[in-house]
Amino acid sequence: MASAETYDILVIGSGESGKYLAWTMAGEGHRTAVVERKLIGGSCPNIACLPSKNIIQSAKVRSFTRRAAEFGVDLESAATNMRGVQDRKRAMVDSLIEVHLGRYRASGAELIMGEAHFSGERTVDVELNDGGWRKLRGERVFLNLGSRATVPDVPGLAAARPMSHVGLLDLDRLPEHLIVIGGGYIGLELSQAMRRFGARVTVIESGPQPLGHEDADVTAGIVELFGDEGITLHRQTSVRSVDGESGRSVRLVAEGPDGELTIDGTDLLVAVGRTPNTDGIGLEQAGVRLTETGYIAVDEHLATTAADVWAMGDCAGSPQFTHVAFDDFQVVHDNLTGGSRSTSGRLVPFCMYTDPELARVGLNETEARRLGLGYRVLSMPMAAVLRTRTISEPRGFMKMLIAADSDEILGFTAFGAEATELLAAVQTAMVGRLPYTTLRSAIYTHPAMAEGLTFLLRNTPVPG
């Protein structure tokens, strides 16, 4: 192989952190290359965040057809056409890929499609997708390797060829009976979408409740929602064995509160967590140390144990959200240009795009109690927000945690329509360390969802 081509900036992986760092550094005059195995722009625009929300929106439209009479609309037919659903999603993905390619051209960053393997310090051998090899060396190297769906070690599960979210989001057909293992964000979002398209759906959650890190009122709201939509939810249930093949026929034997049960279905989705893509690329050759759980060990500036090598996004153990990966880029870029931004104390918003949505920032009551923090609570049902009456979506509630001895906002949770947009106002106040009384003094548009803050904050906080 020829001698290494040297770049100022070498990025492995074109996900959220990697692409923005590459575009920015190239735009600032640095010779920059990005090595990407398959997905231009990473998982978010191709197989994860944006495609899932696209399909979730189609499912929401499908749900409206069932409620058409409620809105004064008569419909003759409202059958699900999964090929049409996929055509809409694929058109969006194709357009996003073109946007990304345009950004590479405009910035001057070189996109190299191939598989990278470290052969030494800051040096990789790249097997190109269209044939041949290149050896690349970076004066500074940035790892944006991402993660993949975890498949638990259950007898027969791997042999059943279960889907991850990637496979489910690309189905041109509707599963007859989808069995979902896992009651986290991915499992719940896609369970509801498939149910709204017309599939039977069964969710198996090993913990006492789905979203076990959330407060009891949140999980109760989710359980009620899924029951109303006809989704079967098995809690405190562990899968013991799997037989069959997903897409044809599968049988799960599980252990629940009432003993052993057998669940038969046609399709199987596994959504129990993520595994970092850190194995098999020779990180040990680069002097990059991993944690016990397989993530890249980084400091608060996202520097690894190897000189002039940084890691960003999922592979660095960052909270697995695209908005956090973008912040990782900002942390790294700030430090490269003389700043000292860090990941310490970040205020990370959590959003789940079920319908209605769940949005949270800061502490919830469960976390506050675990930390031994005194707090007061402001709470209000979403039905008290007039906007929910106009759109016929009154389900849910919002609540704010206030410090026991000051007016500091400790956290905010909203379970309801447009909750993710409502979150932004409170998050901004928390970033600026504004007391909740400042938000209370603001004038909010009528009848917008944010107007609900007016009425929430007029209440008297009660001890938690």
Image (spheres, grey):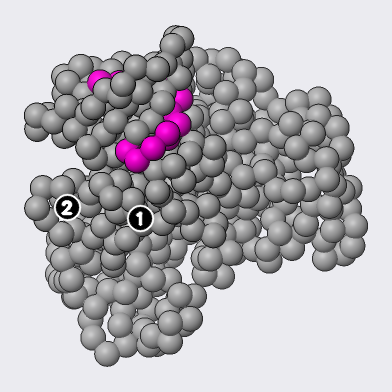
Q: Which residue is disc 2 drawn over?
A: 335
Q: Is residue 115 magenta?
A: yes
| Residue 358 point in image, percent of width and height | 45, 54
432 or 59, which lies in front? 432
Whether residue 242 is visible to the viewer of this picture, yes or no, is yes
413 or 162, which lies in front? 162
Q: Is residue 354 above or below residue 238?
A: above
**SS state under label 2:** helix
Task: Specify the amino acid type for callout 1.
Answer: Thr
Identify which residue is drawn at 26% across, 34% down: 138
Q: Which residue is disc 1 drawn over?
A: 305
Q: Is residue 181 above or below residue 367?
A: above
| Residue 126 point in image, percent of width and height | 41, 23
Q: Residue furthest bottom?
A: 405
Q: Which residues are magenta?
A: 110-122
**SS state under label 1:** loop
Label 2 crowd (10 A; few <14 / some 14-19 / many >=20): some
Q: Is residue 319 magenta?
A: no
Identify which residue is drawn at 31% across, 16% down: 98
Identify which residue is drawn at 35% across, 47% down: 311
| Residue 307 point in image, percent of width and height | 28, 50
Task: Specify the amino acid type for callout 2.
Answer: Asn
Give the quadrant of residue 41: top left
Quadrant in the picture for the N terminus: top left
Quadrant in the picture for the C terminus: bottom left
- How many angstroms separate mark 1 from mark 2 (CA)? 16 Å
Q: Is residue 401 left or right of residue 196?
A: left
Q: Main secondary structure of the magenta part?
A: strand
